Image (cartoon, rainbow, N blue to C red):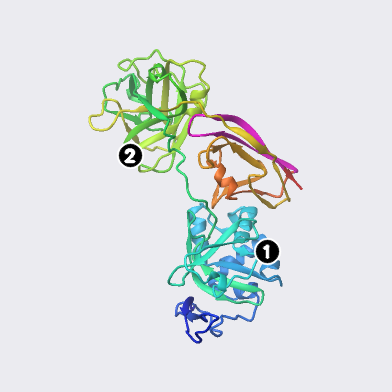
Amino acid sequence: MKNIKFTKSISFVVMCLAGLSMCFSCVIQDNFDYKESGTTGDLGVSALEFIQTNDSFSMLKNAIELTGLEGVYGGESIRTFIAPTNAAFTTYLQSNAYSSLSEVPVPILRNVLRYHIVKAKVLFTDPELFESNFPISYETESGQSIFLSHNTNFIGLINQNTSRQWEISTSNLEPTNGVIHVVNSIVFFSAPSVNFDALDPSVRTDTIFPLFDSFVNGGAQSNANFGTNPLLRVKNVTGAGDFDRRAYLMFDLNELETEGVITDLRFQIGVVFTHARNNDLDLYHVKDTTWTEMGLNWNNATLPDDGPIATLKTTKITAFNYDITDFFSTQNSLGRVTFMLDGEFTKDETNDLASKEHPTIAPPMLIATIATGDSALEFVTNAGFTVESGGSFVWNKEMLEITGASVNDIIYTVVEGPERGFLVRGASILKVGDRFTQNDINVMNLLYINDGNGSTDKIVLSARDRAGARLDAFDVLITIQ
C-alpha cells in the first residue's frame, strides 16, 4: 500500500498588498497499496467504499460492521474520518486484553469509532490550520473534542498538548463525503495527567513499622516457627500443603500521629523475589493480636473472618503497596492490628518479601498521609444526566461540580461502577477504586456509555481534596431513554 504523506509546498507567487499566497500538496510514498489519484488526494468514492476496498483497513471495516456505523461512513453528511490501520486495532486489542474485535463490548467499540469522526471537513490545507503547533478543537460524533494541528514539518498531529498526542501517517485523502486522515494508533482525548498522590504543602506523612512479623508454612512444617527469618514467604499451592505459606504482621496504630486528619493509609512491603505472573496477592485483616513473633506457626495462626481488605496484581517491582485507607476509616478505635498476606488460591506463585529482619531492604511499613483538615468541599451541583439507550454522555460541570479546592486537587474515587454501562476516561474503563479529578469533568474527559439496557443507572462516588477535606459516598443518577 502506498503511503500518502502530507508535506509543505510553498510558492511565493505574488507579493502584494494582499500578502503571501501559499499552497500545499500530498506526496505519495512507496509503502501504501492504493494508487495516487492526483495531488489533491481525491478518491472518488465514499469513505466507507474506500475502507471496504483496502486491506490495510480490514479491521476498521469489521469494526464499522459490528457497530452498525455504515450509514455514517457511507452517508452524504460531510465528515472528517480518522482511519486507524490494522496495526492500530491490533495494538488496541492487545492493550485491553481482547483477542478479537468481537470481544469488545459493542457500546465501547462504537464510541471508539465515533471519537474518530469529526463533525466537519478538516483539511490540513485549510487556512486556519496554517500556523504550526497550534491545536484547534473540533467536535466529534462522541461529543468529546479532538484537537488537530501540525508540527513545523507539516506532519499532522492529533491532540497535541494533551496527555497523549499522535502523528497522522497520511493526510488529506478526500472521499466524496469528507476527508480521511490515516493513523497507526487508536486515538482518544486525555486531559493533562495529574499525580493523584501529590501532597498539599500543609500535608505531612508519618511512618510506623511492625511490632512482629513472620510467616507460617503448612504440611510437614506446620509446627515450625520462622520469626527470625529475613523473608516473609507467601505461596498458595493447595491451601494447606508442604509449600503453602502465609505472612503475618502486627502493627500498633497508636504509634501514628494523632494531630490532624489521616487522609490516606498505605501498607508497603519490599519485594525480594516474585514470579510476577500478574496473580492476586491479597491482604487480610486478622482479629487476633495475641500472637508472638517467636511463637507463631501454621497450626496456631488465626485465619481472617472476612475477604481481603486490599488486593494487588504481582509485577516486577521493588515494593508492593496496598491502599488500606477504607479499612482504617472503619476502625472505631486505634490499637494493635494484624494483617495476613496470602497468594491467589492454587496459583503456585512464589512471593518472597522482606521482613523487618532483612539486612538490606527496608522493613514493612504503614505510611499515613496526615492533613490539617481545615479545608471544606461543597457541592455546586449534582444533577445527574439523561442518555439515550445504547448511547453515550460526556460529563461536564453542569451535571457535577464540587468546589473548595483547585480543580486538579478535587479527587473523585469510584465507589460503585454503573450496572448498565461503562464509565470511561481516555481509553480506560474506570473500575471501583479508580480516580479522576474535577478538571477531568470540566474539560469533558469522562463519558458514560450505556450498554443498551435498563431505564436507570447510577454511579457511586466519593470526593476528597489534598488537604484532608472529604465528601462521603454519593450517587450520580442516570436516566436512560
Residue 317, given in percent of the width and then of the height, sits at 35, 41
Could you tell whether 413 is left or right of 152 in the image? right
Disc 2, SS: loop
**Direction bottom: furthest residue:** 13
Let me know if residue 460 is in the magenta part: yes
Under mark 1, the amino acid is: Leu
Taking depth in this image into account, of 392 and 232 the one nearest to the observer is 392
| Number of dots carrying numbers | 2
Residue matched to label 2: 318
- Mark 1, Cα crowd under 10 Å, few <14 / some 14-19 / many 20+, is some
Residue 292, given in percent of the width and then of the height, sits at 34, 15
Could you tell whether 382 is left or right of 253 in the image? right
Under mark 2, the amino acid is: Thr
Query: What residue lies at 45% left-to-right and 77% top-to-bottom?
Result: 31
Could you tell whether 329 is left or right of 205 in the image? right
Let me know if residue 244 is in the magenta part: no
Taking depth in this image into account, of 263 and 14 the one nearest to the observer is 14
